[in-house]
Structure formats: structure tokens, C-alpha cells
Image (cartoon, rainbow, N blue to C red):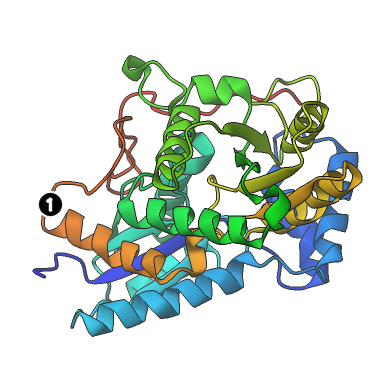
Amino acid sequence: MDMQFDALLVLSFGGPEKPEDVRPFLENVTRGRGVPPERLDAVVEHYMHFGGVSPINALNRDLIERVEGELAAAGVDLPVYFGNRNWHPMVEDTVAKMREDGVRNAAVFATSAWGGYSGCRQYHEDIARARDAVGDGAPTLTKLRQYYDHPLVVGAFADGVRAARAELPEATRDTARLVFTAHSVPSAADRNAGPPAEGGNLYSRQVAEAAKLVAEAVGVDDFDLVWQSRSGPPQVPWLDPDICDHLDTLSAKDVRAVIVCPVGFVSDHLEVVWDLDTEAKDKAAELGMDFVRAATPGRDQRFAQLVPALVRELADAEQPLRLGVEPLLGSTTNGASCAVNCCAAVQRPR
């Protein structure tokens, strides 16, 4: 591989790693978003349920170790750095370390597969903010593209669904309903997702396409797509229905088993282990419904293979390897937008 990059930055959301980190972390995440204090209190308790530790940093360190192994096996000398938006290691500190180490031109892998403000545009803003903080000599940072429909990602999700189905009792296995979930966002933010010329709703369109691709891979032609983990003020419309409300709907239709695939998440973040493995699972039990949750792809070795594949694709100007047809964006340099007004932030009520 004729590499034009001299480093790789894994850029993620961040999460607390001890109880005293939880509140400051959540205040960073929600600053200026009008999140009700009682919602913040509830989320603090979710973290405390897991000892005040988010799984996300450990998952990312594990991913980085496996990516380093994939790079070494391919004979590629590319140091891998780790930075976050909301908690340590903060991306500003990481980019400063990259400058100290002499890095000049780095690829950036964001741990979000999607378009939209939170899933893509905000990572561009993180890159620009970090470079501004570092100042002269900051490395050039080029974000890798969105990858929700890459065959490695779709294949890992599909195998997760197959394995989950096998966990169900034989009596309900063949009639289990396949339900895909993704993180909800404000409806107005989704309308603003993507270049205006593309018509908006890029995030929900990509999620719907990913769900369709995974369903096709496992031979299912009738499935549901629902949402989870909303956090905004109740008067602001968000994408719905919510997964727990949907379980009520399925129960009323006498569905006795569900396979839930968190297609909107690349790893088992807190939203997965709390909102699905705890709240939704408990809801299903209350309804007398068998419930299994498919694995996210983050720990699958195919996900570690994805990262250098995307770097190679960009470095060698290869045609993107993908299964979908929705617009594919997300790759710009030094925090530039993909297009004018692409995925612009929505002003939230205070």
C-alpha cells in the first residue's frame, strides 16, 4: 500500500471511567441542549448501574489494539492514536501529542457509521476544534467516509442476528419478529441531515437502508425499524416509535418473541447495555415475550479489518466498497463540511 498518511486517529464520543467522572461527562455532552435536569439525573443512575463506567473507552482501546494487529500483519507502519469529543483522552490533547510526535498527515476513523449532525458533522467540528487548539504545526486530519453499508459491517450484523435467533427457544424461534433500532435524533435534525440538494433525512434513510441490507442477508423480508435513547426536552419531536413502546404494539399483535438488532451502534455502548439489555429486555419480560439482542460489530474482527480497508481506499483512491445506494459522504480534510449547509446543527430550545 502506497500510504500517504503517517498516522491514524480513532475519534470517538468518550465516556466516564469512574463514578466521579459521570456528572462532568454528561454536562459536557448536554451543554446547550436543553436537556431537563431530571433526565440527566436518570442517566447518571444508568451509569451507576454499571459502576460509573461507560464501556466505550475500553471497547475503543480493544479496537485500536486489533487494528494495530491488522496493520502490522499487512506490513503497514501506521501509529494509531485515540481521542474523544467529550471525555479523556480529549481529542485536543491527542492532536497536540500527534504534533509533538511529528505527525503531519493523519487519517481519522470516527466511531460512527452515519451521516447527520451528531453522526458525522460534529466529528468534522471536533477535528477543526482540535487543530485550532493545537495551532501552528497541527497535523492535517482527513476523516474517513461513512461506512454503514460496507460489506464487513453488514456481514457482522447479519451474523449477530443469526446467532441471536439461535438463542431463542425452538417454540418461538421461527416466528420471532426482527426489530432494528438506532439512536433517535430530533426530527428537525434529521430533516437537516445531508446536503440540502439531497433532500435531507440522510441519517434515517441510511439507517433504513442498513436495516434492509442486514435483513436481506439473513433472509428476512418483513421487519421493523424503531428508535431508542432520546434525551431532549419532551416538547421537541424526535424520531419514533421508541423500542419499548413498539414492544407494547407487538405484544398487542400477539408477537411472542423478538430479535433486536441495534443496527445504529457499532459497539455495545451504554445505550445498548442499558436501553436494550436492561430496559427493553425487562419490558419484554413484563409482556411475556422472549427477547434476544444481536451483537454489535465492534468486537468482530471484521470491524478491525474495516478501518485499514477504509484508509487504503482513501490513500489509493479506490472505489468505495459498499452495498447501499443512499448518498455516501463524510470524508473531508481539517473539518470542512461535505457540502454547504450539510448536516447543519439545529438550534434547540433552552
Name which quarter of the figure residue 234 lies in: top right
Residue at image point 27% right, 48% down: 333
Residue 253, horizontal then vertical, whole percent: 77, 26
The one nearer the camera, 141 or 297, is 297
* Vertical side of 242 occupied by 54: above or below: below
201 lies left or right of 224: left
Residue 297, horizontal then vertical, whole percent: 48, 60
144 lies left or right of 127: left
The one nearer the camera, 291 or 96, is 291
Residue 131 visible in the snapshot? no
Residue 63 visible in the snapshot? yes
276 lies left or right of 108: right
Residue at image point 27% right, 72% down: 103
Q: How many marks?
A: 1
Q: Quadrant of the N terminus?
A: bottom left
Counting other residues with Cα less than 10 Å from the Cα at mark 1, is it few (<14), some (14-19), or many (20 or more)? few
Label 1, secondary structure: give it: loop
The one nearer the camera, 281 or 304, is 281
Residue at image point 36% right, 72% down: 98
115 lies left or right of 23: left
* Vertical side of 15 occupied by 32: above or below: above
**Type of the residue with mark 1:** Glu
Q: Quadrant of the C terminus?
A: top right
Residue 158, horizontal then vertical, whole percent: 46, 53
Query: Which residue lies under the disc numbered 1?
Result: 318
Residue 81, horizontal then vertical, whole percent: 41, 72
Hey, which residue is sitting farthest front in the picture? 171
Name which quarter of the figure residue 255 lies in: top right
The one nearer the camera, 115 or 134, is 115
